[in-house]
Image: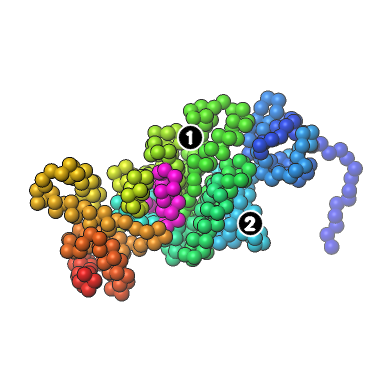
């Protein structure tokens, strides 16, 4: 039996402040002169807050849990730690809020390790080159705008044209690839959150995914902290040598929440009323995504931030900030969406600056001229609308372009394997589909790709072997 130390009478010194004002998820506090930024503080009714702004007379705190008893004059004290979230494999398959509390009606996950939400990005010496591909299952992305593990690829476009569906496809396509996923849903209505979770469950993708949710009716502090919580969860696995994928859906609402908090805290507004440090806010979040060198674990964190534009305006403040931070962007065009060309990716304005380094040589070779051919076709098609007489060679290019446009169409929640990508690239590039009418090419190609696994081909298989198999498959379908 361990003897307890005897109780001694004595003085205890502690700092205590009081609430000077409260409203809209913000508390103004007097006292606590030694408070630090991002420190947790506790209210007498059990509520907690996060120190967000230090002033000469008062400090501003964002409320993380708010009971109805928080009123002016209530005492406030230090909790003595910074904000952390539980991390580990117990989170897989769970739906949690930015503080790690469960939202799926199940018991809290048993977690033994914690990581701070705010952490410094890995220094240059710990990083490695992007060298392995991350397949999203999208024909256009994996062949023409490739993404590598550790890359930060922005998904940008107007509201309601398939940005979230593209990111959801990427998560679903990681099944069986040993990639752990984190989906951060910021400021979305409950119906959208439920739809995303159900889509993951039906695709058996929830087993390797964590969903971090800050709903539209959540406190602004929760919406602000959500992407940092998702990043901390993925960063833990990255440090253990695992490959991770993080989807931030979307950072427009995150920026709006930060603007709301900043204006409530009377910070001076800048362009579009955003505070001047909004660029630093997103850069310190996205710079934590990288590939670690083998000496530091060798893990990776790939980021797919989503941002919303208004009427295709790319020069707005937040879109330009994120374009400059990330390693490329996938731009979705509302006109393509209205025309039924799905996914509505504008190939001309989409780019991947480093993903080509990680692309498999076979896919890279087969897709070398696809992008240029498609962009030339779009120009020729625009010219042909004037009704001028076209040469035979131009008409042939138009036919091939229309065929390619039909091939590139893809339904949501139907990601394709990398073998299927190479198959359609070779079939189109070698002219194996020219005898197929454009309106039937999608059906013929889908039937052929369904039989492809029986051929037991690999990406490194000889090209002639691929072409022989493809001719046999397509001959039976035409």
Tell which tag, 1 or 2, sits nearer the viewer: 2
The answer to whether residue 345 of the structure is visible from this angle is no
Along the horizontal axis of the image, is 74 left or right of 285?
A: right
Label pair 1/2, CB-CB below 8 angstroms: no
For mark 1, give the secondary structure. helix
Read off the magenta span.
Answer: 146-170
Quadrant (top left, top right, bottom left, bottom right) of the N terminus: bottom right
Residue annotated with mark 1: 279
Image location (x, y in percent) of residue 242:
48, 58
Image location (x, y in percent) of residue 398:
18, 51
Image location (x, y in percent) of residue 403:
22, 57
For mark 2, give the secondary structure. loop
Residue at figure coordinates x 36%, y 49% from the top left: 337
Q: Which mark is residue 102?
A: 2
Quadrant (top left, top right, bottom left, bottom right) of the C terminus: bottom left
Most extreme residue toward the left is 391
Q: Which is more toward the observer, 237 or 464?
A: 464
Disc 1 or 2, which lies upstream in sequence?
A: 2
The CA span between labels 1 and 2 is 31 Å
Most extreme residue toward the right is 9
In magenta segment, residue 379: no
Q: Which is more toward the observer, 376 or 284?
A: 376
Position of 78 relative to 192 (above/below): above
């Amino acid at each position: 039996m361990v003897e307890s130390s005897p109780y001694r009478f004595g003085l205890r010194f502690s700092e205590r402040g009081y609430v000077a004002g409260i409203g809209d998820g913000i508390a103004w506090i007097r006292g606590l002169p030694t408070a630090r930024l991002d420190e947790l503080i506790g209210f007498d009714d059990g509520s907690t807050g996060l120190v967000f702004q230090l002033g000469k007379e008062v400090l501003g705190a964002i409320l993380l849990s708010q009971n109805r008893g928080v009123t002016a004059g209530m005492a406030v004290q230090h909790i003595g730690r910074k904000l952390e979230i539980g991390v580990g494999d117990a989170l897989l398959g769970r739906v949690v809020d930015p503080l790690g509390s469960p939202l799926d009606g199940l018991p809290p996950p048993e977690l033994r390790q914690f990581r701070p939400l705010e952490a410094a990005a890995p220094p240059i010496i710990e990083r490695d080159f992007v060298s392995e591909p991350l397949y999203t299952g999208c024909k256009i992305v994996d062949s023409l705008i490739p993404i590598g593990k550790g890359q930060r690829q922005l998904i940008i476009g107007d509201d309601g044209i398939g940005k979230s569906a593209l990111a959801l496809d990427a998560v679903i396509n990681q099944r069986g690839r040993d990639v752990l996923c984190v989906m951060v849903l910021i400021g979305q209505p409950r119906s959208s959150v439920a739809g995303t979770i159900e889509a993951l469950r039906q695709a058996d993708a929830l087993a390797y995914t964590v969903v971090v949710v800050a709903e539209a009716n959540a406190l602004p502090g929760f919406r602000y902290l959500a992407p940092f919580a998702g990043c901390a969860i993925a960063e833990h696995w990255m440090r253990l040598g695992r490959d991770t994928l993080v989807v931030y859906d979307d950072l427009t609402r995150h920026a709006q929440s930060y603007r709301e908090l900043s204006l409530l805290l009377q910070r001076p507004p800048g362009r579009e009323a955003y505070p001047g440090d909004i660029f630093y806010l997103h850069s310190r979040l996205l710079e934590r995504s990288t590939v670690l060198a083998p000496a530091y674990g060798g893990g990776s964190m790939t980021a797919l931030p989503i941002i919303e534009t208004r009427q295709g305006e790319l020069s707005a403040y937040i879109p330009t900030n994120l374009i400059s931070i990330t390693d490329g962007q996938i731009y979705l065009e509302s006109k393509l969406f209205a025309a039924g060309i799905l996914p509505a990716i504008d190939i001309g304005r989409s780019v991947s600056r480093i993903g080509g380094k990680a692309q498999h040589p076979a896919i890279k070779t087969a897709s070398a001229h696809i992008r240029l051919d498609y962009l030339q076709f779009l120009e020729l098609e625009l010219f042909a609308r004037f009704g001028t007489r076209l040469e035979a060679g131009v008409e042939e290019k138009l036919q091939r372009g229309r065929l390619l446009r039909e091939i590139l169409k893809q339904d949501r929640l139907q990601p394709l394997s990398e073998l299927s990508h190479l198959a359609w690239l070779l079939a189109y590039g070698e002219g194996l589909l020219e005898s197929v009418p454009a309106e039937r090419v999608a059906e013929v190609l889908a039937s052929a790709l369904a039989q492809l696994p029986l051929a037991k081909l690999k990406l490194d298989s000889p090209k002639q072997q691929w072409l022989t198999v493809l001719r046999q498959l397509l001959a039976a379908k035409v």
